[in-house]
Amino acid sequence: MTSVFIESSALFRAYTREPGSVLMDEIFSAMEAHRITGLISQFSVPEILRGIIKRKNLRELADDEAQKIIDSILVDIDTRIVNGELLVLALGDNYLPEVNQLIRSSNFFVIDAVQLVTAYHATPALFLHADNHFNGRGIQEKLVTIDIRNPDAETEMRKII
Amino acid sequence: MTVTVKIPTDLARRLNTLVDENVYPSREAALEDAIRFLVAMKGKLYNRIEIQEILSRHITVPSDKILQDVRQEEEL
């Protein structure tokens, strides 16, 4: 089955309404229909949860609402794992030299480098993101990347899937 | 004192699958989450569309900016 790596910034947009969210709705529908398998890094969900807690700390969300949203996201993700729609990929010990090299050569944040190297090893058909850091030429030589915020992202995706 | 928690069969099956797939390190960790989920379910969780509505209503900053802030925070 075709696999699609969903980077944290793309995964977050599956739970918000922003440019790219409609495309993520399509991806999630395709996962539910078992037409594609979604791949995420083991660090993606904690990163999103930290983002929600940070907005709670800034009082954009009430504490009980933030906790309920976090529980809801965890149950949604776990349900998709159980249903075989989504796979969580761990960082292999043997990936670390590549992560270090990527940080040295491309000035990536740690989590960006971890996700990229995890994706390289999973060889997905597509790498979906909503982050300008992943638009560099070096990445596109190794992965087919799509910035889900771009207006032509849906057309690009349909060419491949 | 002993505490007994009755876990629905379907939830137990789903948690066992998560343990088998190494999402949880142990059955004890899965049980902790099971209890948390049971409590949360009593208060009715949101589905993905409802999460979208609530986050969009309350959070005005784009999600990529939120994640970038988290990444910068981790580096401090």
Image (cartoon, coloured by chain):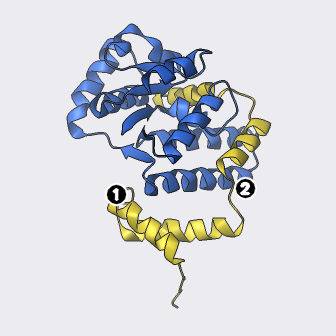
> Which quarter of the rendering shows the C terminus of chain A?
top left
- Which amino acid lies under the numbered mark 2 shown in the image of this protein? Asp
Looking at the image, the residue that sits furthest to the top is A137
Is A87 on the left or on the right of A132, as rendered? left
| Residue occupied by mark 1 | B21
Q: Chain of mark 2?
A: A
Q: Residue at the location (52% across, 69% down)?
A: B34
Q: CA distance from mark 2 to mark 1?
A: 30 Å
- Which amino acid lies under the numbered mark 1 shown in the image of this protein? Glu
Q: Residue at the location (68% across, 55% down)?
A: A68
Looking at the image, the residue that sits furthest to the left is A94
Q: Residue A120 location in percent, x, y?
A: 30, 27
Q: Residue B59 location in percent, x, y?
A: 74, 35
Is A120 on the left or on the right of B61, as rendered? left
Determine whether A70 is above or below B13 in the image. Answer: above
Q: Residue at the location (65% across, 66% down)?
A: B41
Q: Residue A65 location in percent, x, y?
A: 73, 52
Q: Quadrant of residue A9?
A: top right
Determine whether B6 is above or below A26 in the image. Answer: below
Q: Which residue is at the front of the view, A68 or A28?
A: A28
Crowd rating for badge 2 (residues with CA inside 10 Å; few <14, some 14–19, many 20+): few
Q: Residue B57 location in percent, x, y?
A: 79, 38
Q: Chain of mark 1?
A: B
Which tint is chain B? Answer: yellow
Which tint is chain A? Answer: blue
| Residue occupied by mark 2 | A64
Q: Residue at the location (58% across, 65% down)?
A: B37
